Image (cartoon, rainbow, N blue to C red):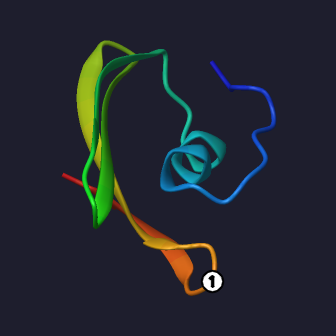
Amino acid sequence: MRRGTVTGNTRRKHLLEQRDFDYILEEYDAPDFYEMTVSIGGDVCRFRCYGNAADGFSICEK
């Protein structure tokens, strides 16, 4: 399910804009990254988003 357009410059908002998933299982916000565990078509995936709005974001799948 695609979420509505999310505006802003946080790691969480960037991750919500860039990835499609069914629902969020767990979220963790650390000082240097944001991590989200989600369900995608019955599979469980974990994504981490690093960076900031000034330098750019990067998303890694764990």
Image height of 23 relative to 48, above or below? above
Q: Which residue appears at 49% of the width and 26% of the height? A: 21
* Image label count: 1
Tell whether 14 sits left or right of 59.
right
Image vertical order of residue 44 relative to residue 14, above or below:
above
In the image, residue 59 sits, relative to residue 43, either above or below, namely below
Which residue is farthest front?
Answer: 31
The residue under the point 30% across, 60% down is 33
Q: Pick the quarter of the image with the N terminus.
A: top right
**Residue 58 pos. (x, y %):** 44, 71
Mark 1, Cα crowd under 10 Å, few <14 / some 14-19 / many 20+, is few
Depth check: 54 or 15 in front?
Answer: 54
On the image, which quarter does residue 26 sit in? top left
The image quadrant of residue 40 is: top left
Q: Position of residue 51 (x, y in %)?
A: 44, 74
Pick the front one: 26 or 2? 26
Q: Residue at x 63, y 83 (%)?
A: 54
Q: Is residue 8 left or right of residue 52?
A: right
Residue that badge 1 annotates: 54
Q: Amino acid at mark 1?
A: Ala
Q: Is residue 43 left or right of residue 8?
A: left
Looking at the rendered structure, the secondary structure element under dot 1 is loop
